[in-house]
Image (cartoon, rainbow, N blue to C red):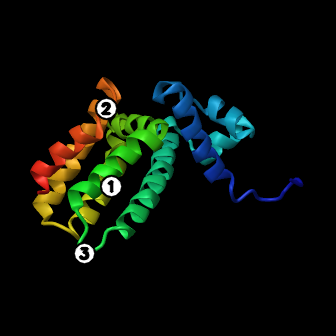
Amino acid sequence: MPKGTADRERPLRIALAALEVVADKGVEGLTHRAVAAVADIPLGSTTYHFRTLDDLLAAAIVEAKKATDDDLAVWADGLGPGSDLADAVTDYVMNALTQHWDRLVVEHELYMAALRRPQLRSLSREWDKAFPAVLSLHTDTVTAETVAMVVDGMFVRALIHGMPSRDEVQQVLRRLLP
């Protein structure tokens, strides 16, 4: 790129590189230097656009949320008025666990980064709203929130204990969504 030409995509490239670093090294491995190396840009550019590591984490959270929101929108578009919601949510959970495992790991690391970084909590809370909002179009609000919490628990449990079977997931969801 010629000198003096603005790289309008650089902040996005940095945020996506931060996601890659978290995927490879975890939140603890996130440094401006590591992000600059992955983005193939000068170190000063990362600190220019994202002054602190928390700024980098926030940008990574925003980009990760966009990906999950896109998947959620595709899934939601497939829900019709007569859909079996327990089956559909089971499909959603199993797809996340089998097709997007690496992303699920990164997303949960980023989500949990808010535990010790209060400035990231509002972003993590925003992340929480999308799934129950979709579910509430097909069931009452309390059930939608309950299912979302149970699905979150299934994801965390799968990350620690290993993959549940489709039958295990469906049995739990059938209790909530008969």
Mark 2 vs mark 3: in front: 3
Q: Which mark is residue 81?
A: 3
Residue that lies at the very extreme toward the front in this rendered image: 167
- Tag 2: residue type? Ala
Lower position in the chain sequence, tag 1 or tag 3: 3
Towards the viewer: 41 or 3: 41
Which residue appears at 40% of the width and 34% of the height?
109
Q: Position of residue 53 (x, y in %)?
A: 51, 35
Lower position in the chain sequence, tag 2 or tag 3: 3
- Residue 139 is left or right of residue 23, and the answer is left
Q: Residues within 10 Å of mark 3 (few under 14, many from 20)?
A: few
Q: Position of residue 21 (x, y in %)?
A: 57, 33
Residue 122 visible in the shown view = no
- Tag 3: residue type? Pro
Q: Which SS class for mark 2?
A: helix
- Residue position marked by numbered label 1 in the rendering: 126
> Which image quadrant for residue 18?
top right
Find the distance from the CA under tag 1 to the CA under tag 3: 26 Å
Find the distance from the CA under tag 2 to the CA under tag 3: 30 Å
Which residue appears at 37% of the width and 37% of the height?
108
Q: Which SS class for mark 1?
A: helix
- Residue position marked by numbered label 2 in the rendering: 158
